[in-house]
Amino acid sequence: MSAPTSPADLFRCSLRLLLDKNIPAWVVLWAEDGLAEFPFAPDGWPRRLEGKEAIAAYMRHYPDHIDLHDFPDLRIHQTTDPQTIVVEMRGVGRLVETGAPFDMTYVVVVTVRDGRIISYRDYWNPLAVQEPGADFAGSSR
């Protein structure tokens, strides 16, 4: 796969890798000092992951818990900073443990540096993780 040329292309590539359940390749898209933030994370869930290794550990078991099928309603907005995009999207699929539908709404602010994700601020809906089987991050709920 050739290197994506813009933040929007890089983000679209990341979504394809998530749908393919290729978490190792998804992690490659991150800068070593990348930062993932989840401002709306409920108690017991991480609000900040610093560095590629922490992000990889957080995402490692995602496909074992959430089987993503599609990202409909994808809207990518350019900002005045050419390296930062704002993304509105839904992730749909099923929860592996229960077979229940998974439908999450996201607003994500992504900044890219040197072709890698350096900052990913994910304003996901914390109510969705109240479903049994949605807890892939090892929360203490």
Image (tube, rainbow, N blue to C red):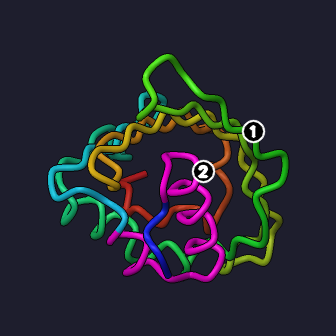
SS at badge 2: helix
Residue 17 included in the magenta stretch of the image:
yes
Q: What span is colored magenta in the figure?
A: 5-28
Q: Secondary structure at mark 1?
A: strand
Please state the horizontal and vertical placement of residue 69, each as a whole percent of the image: 77, 72
How far apart are the two marked residues, 1 and 2, measured between alpha carbons? 23 Å
Residue at 58% x, 31% y is 86
Name the mark on residue 129. Answer: 2
Q: Residue at x 32, y 55 (%)?
A: 116
Instruction: Tell me: residue 7, above or below residue 1.
Output: above
Amino acid type at mark 2: Val
Q: What residue type is disc 1 on? A: Arg
Q: Residues within 10 Å of mark 2 (few under 14, many from 20)?
A: some
Q: How many residues crowd mark 1 within 10 Å: few (<14), some (14–19), many (20+)?
A: few
The residue positioned 40% from the left and 67% from the top of the image is 59
* Mark seen at residue 75: 1
